[in-house]
Image (tube, rainbow, N blue to C red):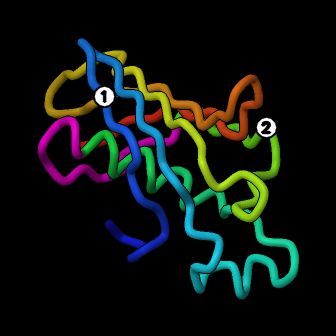
Amino acid sequence: MLLKDFYTITQFNTEDDTITAGISINPKHDIFKGHFPGNPIVPGVTMVQIVKELLGQQQEKTLFLQNALNVKFMAILNPETEPDVMVNITIKSIEDNVVTAFSTITKYDKTFFKFKGQFR
């Protein structure tokens, strides 16, 4: 994990080309001292990192982001009010050691983040 103690995995399921993971974000993590004091917001780059790490866990190897094809931040993710979220990842293809995946971070019917990218 790149960010020590940033999140913990509370649930991790794989079925075919789909990963469903529950994570709990640590609202006391040092990153929130600067992003932003008194109004913490999960940085977008950490959301991409979470997807990379969970996909790497499923693939049983360290992955590197090759292309971020589509990244959308749909709602603010405040770790104090919504620390527990679901990360859903669907593998679209694996060709020449490049994994193309689509991912969302959600809680109930609220979507915080949508991502489509390629990892090597």
Q: For the residue labelled by badge 1, is the local secondary structure a helix, a strand or a loop? A: strand
Q: Nearer the viewer, residue 86 or 3?
A: 86
Q: Residues within 10 Å of mark 1 (few under 14, many from 20)?
A: few
> Which residue in the structure is indicated by mark 1?
13
Q: Which residues are magenta?
A: 57-68
What's the CA distance linking mark 1 and mark 2?
24 Å
Identify which residue is drawn at 14% across, 28% down. 96
Marker count (numbered): 2
* Residue 31 x, y percent position in the rendering: 61, 80
Query: Looking at the rendering, which quadrant does residue 94 occupy?
Result: top left
Proximity of marks 1 and 2: CB atoms separated by less than 8 Å: no
On screen, residue 73 versus residue 20, left or right, reads right
On screen, residue 98 versus residue 36, left or right, reads left
> Which residue in the structure is indicated by mark 2?
74
Q: For the residue labelled by badge 2, is the local secondary structure a helix, a strand or a loop? A: loop
Is 43 placed above or below 119 here?
Answer: below
* Residue 56 x, y percent position in the rendering: 24, 45
Q: Is residue 64 magenta?
A: yes
Name of the residue lying farthest toward the top: 16
Is 7 placed above or below 21 here?
Answer: below
Identify which residue is drawn at 69% across, 79% down. 32
Query: What amino acid is found at the position of numbered circle 2 in the picture?
Result: Met
Identify which residue is drawn at 77% across, 30% down. 110
* Residue 7 x, y percent position in the rendering: 47, 62
Q: Residues within 10 Å of mark 2 (few under 14, many from 20)?
A: some
Q: Nearer the viewer, residue 45 or 81?
A: 81
Reading the chain from its start, which is encountered first: label 1 or label 2?
Answer: 1
Q: Which callout, 1 or 2, points to the residue nearer the camera?
A: 1
Query: What amino acid is found at the position of numbered circle 1 in the picture?
Result: Asn
Is 52 placed above or below 115 here?
Answer: below
On screen, residue 26 versus residue 51, left or right, reads right
